[in-house]
Each structure stands twice: as structure tokens, then as C-alpha cells.
Amino acid sequence: MKLEGKKRVWAEYQKEIPDDHFFYVRSCIRQTFFAGSEQTFLKIMRDDLGKDVYEDPRHTTCTGIGYHGDVVPFETIQTVVARHFALATEAGYKNIAISCVTSFGIYTEILETWKHFPETLEKTRENLFRATGRVFDLPVSISHASDIIYKFRDEIARKAKYNLVDVSSGKPLKAVEHIGCHYAKMFPKHGIGGAEFPHVLVGMIESWGGDVIDYPERRHCCGFGFRQYLVQANRGYSLSASRKKFESLEPYRPDFIVANCPGCAMFMDRWQYTLKELDGITYGSNETGIPTLTYEEMAGLILGYDPWEMGMQYHNVQSLGLLKKMGIKADPAKRFLTKDGSRLPEPANLLNS
Amino acid sequence: MSTVTKHVLVAGGGVAGMEAAGALAELGHRVTLIEKDQKPGGHLKQWHALFPDRRPADEVRKYLSRRIDNRNIKLFTGVSVEKVKKQGHDLHIELSDGSALTADAAIIATGFDLFDARRKEEYGYGIYDNVITSAELEDMFNAGRITTADGRKPSRIGLVHCVGSRDEKVNNNHCSKVCCVTAVKQAVEIRQKLPSCEVFCFYMDMRMYGPYYEELYRESQEVHNVNYIRGKVSEASANINNRLVIKVEDTLAGRPLRMELDMLVLMVGMEMSQAGTRLAEASALGMGINRFLETGDHHYGNNLGHVKGLFYAGTCTAPMNITDTISHARAAVTETVRYLTTR
């Protein structure tokens, strides 16, 4: 493989990411499954990088899952997103930072639609005003939260307490990066590095000392695929897509998987448990699972955050082996304790526990 | 033979330009032939053998070299025509080296550029070691060695048709016409040179429009066992052994297919040349929606430009094969001579 070729592609797909003052919109499913990741993002931004990130509690779902599940019409979702823009406008923010890849795809799709079909923008303004009395300005920039961490990856590297390195051998950890389909496959120009060879997570991994695995099914969907998962009868598709990826990446013996999409992080984590139950197969070394991280968790580990405070113990595949490799001392006994020592509910059937 | 000696500029020293220059010189006209490369011959310089009969490309190169071996022709290489402007009865021509000249007429034969395969990012050209273009395969034929980047003899090669042609995603709706038959020719050559190597062609349609093309296509299957799969390759990647892995839809079998290959050859199509585009823009010549030069009339004025005294020859107007390019160049000469003798 020629790295120069990838660098050329990466150079073509760079986008302007603002330096400060973000209106942050959360993800529905991340707040359920990886609530600590969004908190970690805010902590990194505010405490480590000194940035202004604003949240409005009136922000709602973008209805993206309903839209992709064919139960929310396009006109409706445009109006919902317009309301988000109105909240940002009212708060004086022009830079939207989006936690969810589905929402990011929705926002970019709607903005592109408004650009090419201005009458839909006017209709949406009318609908929003009629429904809520609100008006809005178009945002100046739309960034996925991983774009923002990517932008500050070198600054994070300078503050690093740990690196993506096996402390016992000094060798880089081997990482599988997985990009949500709706990040750049619909609009490559909106993704750092484009759709075929995205750089957004590669850039973080390399800046923090790791090596990236380029495996044959790298671009394949994680298996979430709204209708595959949400329609129970279709879940076999979801599972088989994930299995295809695991089988393809297994020979490279990755130390961990990192994803920038809520669904991807969830499915690449939880389907490992399901596949073990169904097929009796695990895809990590020595019959263990492969820890699947969010990029905020990866950044948090680099900055020395407590993995249990970030909620990493609530992944199906536990990260104890990975933490040890990185030289991070995290007491397994404290995984399911609160700060004041109360017991948290402990999930059953964890892998690598 | 024409009795009136005139000065004609021919822009481009590829197949069309060489044929046009030779024909004009033969008729007694003074010809200035301008070629941007250091040697004339265009893309033919790179080609090993030609379809449909796999005759050595050198035979046609030699024919064209003889064609311009005429004292009426002055050949300038390493310089390109940048602008053409009508000035009274003459044409004022500016060259890339800053010099200028006048001519009674001019033939634009600036040809084509091969599609830059890097623009089809999903195939990983320039990233994966053994993804090459059809032109690079000709280099291998010329060198007499078909090997992977690490020097191994390939056991399975795939050829992807329509790379950069008939593809809205890269803004090329046109068919490049010659890629299908080039793929068939190259597939046969691979099978002849490496009999144990399996060859798969991935195609949308097989456009065997020229004489003996269909026969070659049939021979490739019946005699050489070339495999044809109707479907576009959606992506290429490499596995842990650095073998290529492609995904393709077999539209006849109605199922997706994943295959390991040692080499993937991209049949790159034709686009208007950059030099031609520069010249067309600077001279306001007008280009069609396919970005090739727009001709005076699609049916009966296919060598005519919109400037009097300016004529077009060859693939600067549309993709065509060598046979048609030579015929088109001769037709451009006919139009030029008619203009010079009747103006």
C-alpha cells in the first residue's frame, strides 16, 4: 500500500472546522448507550482545550431514525432541524457540533437540499414559523464532533498522559477505525478524507501513536442499517454484516476498534457478544473480544481520564487488557462503583471481564 | 494535386495530426506541425499491440513517421499551441514558448488525455500496489514482463471496463468507445503470455462496434477462456497477504461477488486533453457537454470549427479508434483544402 496515495486523497478532502464557539447537539442513542462519551467530549473541549461549547436543553431528536425508517416525512424532519438552527440562532451560535453521525448526515442532506432547491428552504421557514413562531439563520459551519477532536488532535497529543502504544513492547497498538456510513458516503466533501479513505479517525490514531489497519471490509457497514436493525425480522442482515467485518479484520489481530458513529460503536461492541452466543466465536486474540471504543473514549484515555468515569465498563467487550497494554492503571474492582462507593448495576455476559 | 501552396498549422502530433500533416504536405502545402511532447506519436507511443488483430503498434507508428517525413513539414516538439485567432484572412497562432506565427488555415488535433484513475477513489489506484491502468499494462507488455509490484507472476487478473466513462459521478457521460475492445485485446494477450493466469473482465455492456471486434470477443471466450462478468466493481481493497479483494455485482447471476485478485487493470477512458481545453478556452472555440470540441455540424460538418479556416481532426472532437482517427484526419484535410482553394 502506498501511503502517499492516501495522503493525496486526504489533502483533497479537508474542510474548515471552526476554532471555537460551538452549539452542541447530542445523539439520542448515545445518551442511552454511551452517555459518558458525550460528557467526555464536553470535558475535553471545555477543560482541556478551553473552548466554548453551548447546549440547549430544548434540543430534541432530529428524528433521523424515523426518517430513515420511513415514518417521518422529509418536510417534517426539515422543520425539526430548522428548529435546532433556530435554537442556535437564538443563542447566538453559528457553528453546529453534532454528536451523532445519523444527525450529521441529516443536517448535511437538508442543507444540500436547501442549497439546490431554495424553495424547500422557504417552505421550511414558513412551516417552522407557523408551528413555533421561530426564525433561523443558516449555520456557518456544520462539524461532526469527531471533526473537532480531529482538528485538535495534535493539541491533545501534546497534553497526552498515555499513547496508543503497548508499553511492554514499545510497539504501536493496532487499531481498526470504523466510520459511520452517513458521515461521508452521501457527501464525501463534508467528511475529512472523503468517503473511501476517511482520515478523521486515522488522523487521531496516528497522532496518538497507534497504527491503523486497512482490512478488506473496512468500508462495509457495521450492520446497524436502520431497517435492518429496527425491523426485528431483518436483524439477521445486521448481524451478518457485522460478522463479515469481524471475519475480515480478525487476521490483523487488532488491539481495539474505534468508531465515530453511535450505532457503529454499539453494534460492533454488542454483536460480538451475540455472535459468541450464536456461533461460539470471538474475534480477538486468545478467544477474547475486541474492545470497541468511541473516539471520545480514545481521546479521554490519551488525556488520562478515568475509564470508569467515561463509562467504558458499560461496553459488552471490556477493555481491561487494552488499558493494561497502554499502561493505564484502572482498578477493575471499581468498575461498577460510584464515586461515593455505591454499587452500580453490573451487566451480565460481559466479554473480557 | 493542389496547385496552390499555402501554410497550414497542425496543432498536435498524434495519430490525427501526423496523418493530417502528411496528407497536406503530400498535396504540396507547407505544414507546421506542433507537438507538445518531445516526440510525435501521441498515445500510440505507449501502445504495444493494437486491436482487433493484435498487430504491433510499431507498424502504425512507422507508417505515421513515414507520413511526416516530408520536406514540406516543419515539426516543432516540446511546444504547444495556446491560442488561435482570426486576423483578416489569416489565423494568428500563439505558442507556449511565447512565439507566434500566422497560417492560412489550421487543423486542431490535440487529441485526448487518459482519464486519471485516481478520481475513481473506490478502486484505490495510486494506493493499492497492484491496481494499474490499461496504459500501464501496455508498458508491461512492452517490457515483456507481467508481474505484480513485488515481482510475482499473477495468477488472477481482473479488468474493469468503463473507468471514467459512462459515469455521472465523474461527470463523464460519454462512452470512450475503445475501452471494451482494448480490454478484450489485453485479456487475450494476458492469456497468451501467462496461460495459467485467470482473466476476468467486468463490464456494463460489450460495445464491439468495429469490424472484427465481435470476432475477437468470441475468440477471447472460445479459444482463450477469458471470463466476462456483467457488473461494475464497487470497490477494491487489499487483504493481509496484499492480494486485492474486489466487490462486484454479477448482474446476470443476480448476486454480489467478492473475489481475490493479484492485479486489477482499470480500462481508463478518454477525456478532452488539457492542452486542447486550454486552447479551446483561450480561443473561445466552444466545447460540447462532453467537453470535447464542438463541431460545426454533428452529422455533416464534423471537421468544422466555428472559426473560418479552423478545422478539427481526431479525438479532440470525441473518442475514436485509430482507424476512425485517420479517416477523420483525412476528412479534415479535404475540408481544409476546399477552404484554401475557394476562399
Image (cartoon, grey):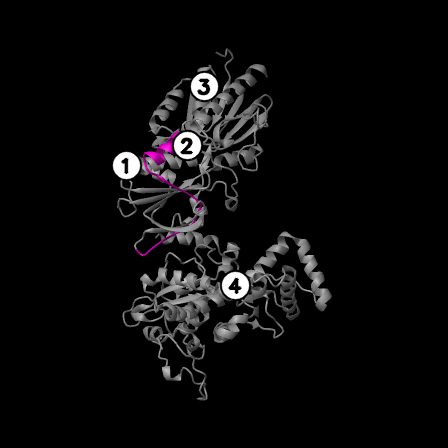
> Residue B210's image quarter?
top left
Counting residues from the start of the chain, the first of labels 1 and 2 encountered is 2
**Does residue A280 appear left or right of residue B17 in this picture?**
left
* Mark 1 Cα shell of 10 Å, populated few (<14), some (14-19), many (≥20): some
Residue contact at pointers 3 and 4, CB within 8 angstroms = no
Q: Is residue B233 left or right of residue B197?
A: right
**Between marks 3 and 1 in the image, the one whose residue lies nearer the viewer:** 1
Q: Nearer the viewer, mark 3 or mark 2?
A: 3
Q: Amino acid at mark 1?
A: Lys
Q: In which image quadrant can residue B211 be found?
A: top left
Contact, CB < 8 Å: mark 2 with mark 4?
no
Between the C-alphas of marks 3 and 1, the distance is: 38 Å
Name the element at disc 2: loop
Chain ID, mark 2? B
| Relative depth, front residue between A284 and B169 | A284
Q: Is residue B266 magenta?
A: no
Identify which amino acid the numbered label 3 is placed on: Ala
State whether residue B194 is above or below residue A7: above
- Provide residue A306's location: percent of width, then percent of height: 42, 79
* Residue at mark 3 to residue at mark 2: CA–CA distance: 23 Å
| Foreground tag (1 vs 4) | 4
- Which one is earlier in the sequence, the residue at label 3 or at label 2? 3
Q: Badge 4 sits on which subunit? A: A
Q: Which residue is mark 3?
A: B23
Question: Which range is magenta?
Answer: B214-240
Which residue carries the number 4 mark?
A226
The answer to whether tags 3 and 2 share a subunit is yes
Amino acid identity at mark 4? Phe
